Image (tube, rainbow, N blue to C red):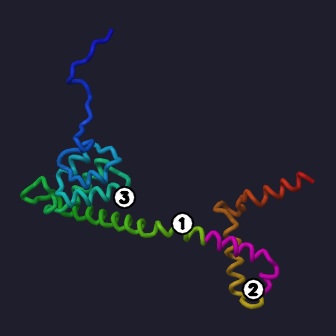
Amino acid sequence: MTTARPARFVARAVESSTGPAGPAGICPEALALLAGYRLPDRTVAALRRMVTLRQLAAALVMVGEDNCSGDLARALLAATRASQRADDPRGRQSDRHRARLLSRMEKGLTHMQETVRFLTPSYHDDLCCLALAASFVRGWMRDDVVTAWLQSHTPGAATTLGRLVSASETATAPKRRMKLPYAPATQTAYRKRR
């Protein structure tokens, strides 16, 4: 028979009156951004060594990359300027050149995240329009009347569209045709019925 463990071994969730409390020393805005992530001790320690605004910026980068690892947090800490660090009142950094390189990498990462955020809303609409236009062009180029009209009026455009259609129908494997589930399957099923 097992005996009950003393109270000191019982795992307790840290909660406050408003809900679960986060690690001390990290601003609430950064914790709100990192709400769904498990924060390793190294990440928490690195964030504690930054001032509030820098914690928020680092949390934005980590959430944007979907990476809350201690390595990324420590790299962001190393890229942090001395004026934005909370751990060293003298404002000293270990290696200015590496900190500058890491800071450039962080700025590039932030720029890429902003570009993705800007392009994502229209990406699916553009892709849908391109796919629709490609299917129209493919259908037109299969029609002899349209192809003859294009050849007589704009032979350059007809040649370009013909190359685009042939390139779109060829898969990335060398000279292998794309397997379209609707075209060959319906034709073979129709032939089998007869």
Residue tagged 1: 124
Amino acid carrying label 1: it is His
Residue 137 forms part of the magenta stretch: yes
Of 90 and 44, nearer the camera is: 44
Residue stretch in magenta: 130-150
Q: Residues within 10 Å of mark 2 (few under 14, many from 20)?
A: some
Asked if the residue at tag 3 contacts the one at tag 1, i.e. Cβ–Cβ closer than 8 Å, the answer is no
Per the image, label 2 sits on a secondary structure element best described as helix
Q: Earlier in the sequence, mark 1 or mark 2?
A: 1
Disc 3, SS? helix
**Residue corresponding to mark 3:** 64
Image spot of residue 101 (x, y percent): 26, 64
Q: For label 1, count other residues whose C-alpha is less than 10 Å away and answer few (under 14), some (14-19) or many (20+).
A: few
Q: Earlier in the sequence, mark 3 or mark 2?
A: 3
Name the residue rendered at 27%, 42% in the picture: 20
Instruction: Measure the C-alpha gap from mark 1 to mark 3.
Output: 20 Å
Circles 1 and 2: CB distance less than 8 Å?
Answer: no
Examine the residues drawn in magenta and state their main secondary structure. helix
The residue indicated by pointer 2 is 150
| Location of residue 167 (image quadrant) | bottom right
User: Does residue 27 appear to the left or right of 193 in the view shown?
Assistant: left
Neighbor class of circle 3 (other Cα within 10 Å; few <14, some 14-19, many 20+) is some
Badge 2 amino acid = Leu
Earlier in the chain: of badge 1 and badge 3, it is: 3
Residue 9 coordinates in the image, percent (x, y): 23, 24
Q: Secondary structure at mark 1?
A: helix
Q: Position of residue 173 (x, y in %)?
A: 66, 60
Q: Amino acid at mark 3?
A: Gly
Q: Name the quadrant of the C terminus.
A: bottom right
